[in-house]
Image (cartoon, rainbow, N blue to C red):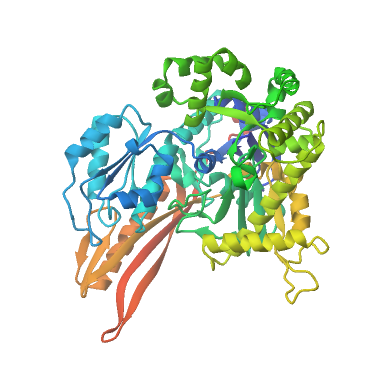
Amino acid sequence: MGLKLGIDTGGTYTDAVLVDAEQNIIAASKCLTTRHDLTLGISDALAELPSKKLLDVVLVALSTTLSTNSVVEGRGAPVGVLLPGYHQQQVEKSGLLDIFDPDMVVTLDGGHDAIGAETTPLDTAGAARAIRKLAMKVSAFAVSSMFGVRNPAHEICIRDLVNDLCSKPVTCGHELATNLDAPRRALTVALNARMVPIIHELIMAVQKIMQDREIQAPLMMVKGNGSLINTRTAMEQPVGTVLSGPAASVVGASALSGAVNAIIADMGGTTTDIAVISDGQPELGFDGVRIGEWKPMVEAVRVISIGLGGDSEVRFSGSAGLEIGPRRVVPLSLLAYQYPEVTRALGKQLSQAPDRRDNRFALRLEHNEVLLSACSESELRAWDLMGEHPIELNDIVETDRNVARAIGHLQRQGLVIYSGFTPSDAAHVLGLSPHWNTEAAELAALLWARQMRHIYGLGRWQKGDAITPSRHVYERVNQRISRALIEAGLHQHRKLDRVKSKSLTGLLAELIFESSDAPGKLLDSGSLFHLHFAADYPVVAVGAPAATFFPDAAQQLGVKLSIPNRAEVANAYGAVLGSVVQRAHITVTQPMYGQFVLHSDRKPMHFSKLREAISTAQTIATDKARTMARAAGATDVGIRLSSNDKHVEHDLDGELFLETRITATATGRPGIRQASTQDDHEG
C-alpha cells in the first residue's frame, strides 16, 4: 500500500510524519521553521525520517498555519483590490482599510442588482488605469463586484484586463463565495490574494525537496474544512487553506485521542485554535469562521483562533496593562539557542540603564521580491546587514539611525521580525520547558520585568527576581486559555453573537478564577446555581506548548485533560487522513411572482417554472462539483445533492417561495502513485 508523508509548516516548527496503511505513525520529526527560506526547515524535518522509507511514499499531504498566522497578525503581501459598484461605506464596513493601504483599494463604476441585471456599465478605462498604476506595487489582484455572485460579468471582465495588462495573479469574489454580503466577500477575496505568495512559496519549497529526495508522489494540501486539494487548486484559492493547520490538528487530535466528544485545543507559536467535536465529527462553518478579528467567507471547521501562542509578545498595552499577543516575536531563549552571542548582549543590556529597546533584536522573516524591489537604499542596507545574524536595536540606534528607521519600516511590512519576551521564555525560567537557552530566558525575564517597573510602572517585582514575573506571565496565559475554552463552549450552539459571548465569557471566567476551592464549579456551594463546564467533553490538547500550558488551565476549569501520544505532531498526522471534498452552490430566486432566475458562475438564466429551474440547477451543480473534485485531485468521485429553501408567509397567497440554494457535494479519494516493490528499488 505504500506510506503517506504528512508535513505541517507552522510559524515556529515544521513537523513531518510517516504513516502506514493502518494509519500508524512509524516515524516523526520536529524542526524549526525557517521563514526566510522554508526549504531549510522542511528539509531538516525530512532528514530526520528514515531516507529509505521516503522512497515508499505514495502521497504527500501538507498543512500549514502560515496563512492563519498572516491573518491574525495582519501580515501578508501587498494587494490591489478592485471593487466595481461598491460605495465608501461598504469599503469601510469590510475592514479592508484596516489591513490595506487606502491607495490599494479602488472603487469603480459598475455592478449589478440582486436579480443579476446590470445597474451601471463597468468603467473599463478606469479599471485599466488602476491596474497599470498598481501592477508594480502589488503581488496580486483581488476583484469583487456588487452582486457579483448573481452576475459575475464585471468581475470576469476585470480579471481578463489584469491578465492582459500584467502577469500578476488575480482572484474574483464569485470564485470563492456564493453568499450575499458584499463587504465580507470583498474582504475574503482580498485576503485570498494576499495569501497567494505565502502558499506559493510553501508549495514550491516542498516540491523542490520532494524532487531532491526523489519522492515521486502527488502533493496535496489540507483545506480549512479538513479535506484535501492538489497544489494547483491551493495556489489559485489559498484562502481555502486559511485554517489548514487547525483543521489538520482537529482531524489528527481526534484520531490520536480516540475521543468522540471533546474540545480540541491546538497551541502553536502564534495562535491557539479551539474546536468542538461531537459524535466524532467537527462542526463545519459554511458562513465563515472567525480568525483573529476577521470573518472571511470560507467553509472550514468551526474554530476559534486567537492570537496566543508560545511566541506571543508579552508587552505593556496602556489601560489594559499586560497584554499577550497577537503579535509573534522570536523568543529570546530561541534566538540565543540559534545565536549564542545574544546571551552576552542580554547580559550587557542588564548592566546598563533600562531602555524600551531592551530584549529587541531584528532578523529577517521572509523574502518578498515585490516588497524588496520597492525598498529604499537604507532599507536594502539594513536587509543586507541581517543576512548573517540578528541586529541589536540598541546598538544600531546609536551607530546608524537611518538603518534603525529602515529596520522599523521593514518590520511593519512583514519582512523583518523582532525578538521579545514570550510565554516560551517564561516557561524556560520556570523549568517547564528546557528546549532552548534557559540562561537567555532568565536574562530576558529580568530585562522585561525591569522595563515594566521603571518605564511603564507595571509590577512590583524584586530586582534580580526572574521567577515571579515569569510566573505572572504563565498565569495570564492560563487565564487566556481558560477564557478561550469557555468562549468556544458558548459558541457551540451559536445562540450568542460575538459581543454577547465575550461579555458572558468574562463573567464566567471571573467566577471560575474566584472559585479556587472547587475547580470546575462556576459558582461555589453558597450560590443558588451549581454549574459545571464541559462535564462530558474532555480537553484534548495538542501542539508543542500544550504539555506546558494546558495542565494548569484544565485544572482551573475542572475539566479532564488528554494530551495524546504524538500530540506534538498532530497537525502533520491529520494532514494525511483527509479525502477530497468539493462543493458547488447554485441559487434559484423568484424576484417576481412566477419568474425564476438561476444564478451560477455564468450569466443568469430565466425560467417560468420552478421545477425546471431546480432541475437545471441540480445538473449544473453536479457537473461543477465533479469537475472541481477531479481538478482538485480526486478519484472515484461520488455526488450528494442537498438544498436549503427559503419561504415566507403571505396574508393572501399563503406560503411563497423566495429562493433555494442547491448544493452538490463531491467526495473522492486523493490520487496516489502505485507503490514501488522491492524489485523496483533494486533496479
Rendered residue at 31%/69% (across/down): 659
Q: Residue at x 24, y 65 (%)?
A: 597
Q: Quadrant of the C terminus?
A: top right
| 277 shown above or below 99 | below
* 599 is higher (above) or lower (below) than 394: below
Front residue of 553 and 358: 358
* Drawn side of residue 27 relative to residue 106, left or right: right
Q: Is residue 577 left or right of residue 155?
A: right
Pinpoint residue 605: horizontal percent, then vertical percent. Answer: 21, 61
Quadrant holding the N terminus: top right
Please tell me which residue is depicted at 36% across the width and 65% down the height of the picture: 661
State the residue lying farthest toward the bottom: 652
Percent of width and height locating residue 202:
51, 32
Q: Position of residue 43 (x, y in %)?
A: 61, 26
Q: Residue furthest top?
A: 399
Residue 646, visible in the rendered structure = yes
Asked where in the image residue 151 lies, by quadrant, the reply is: bottom left
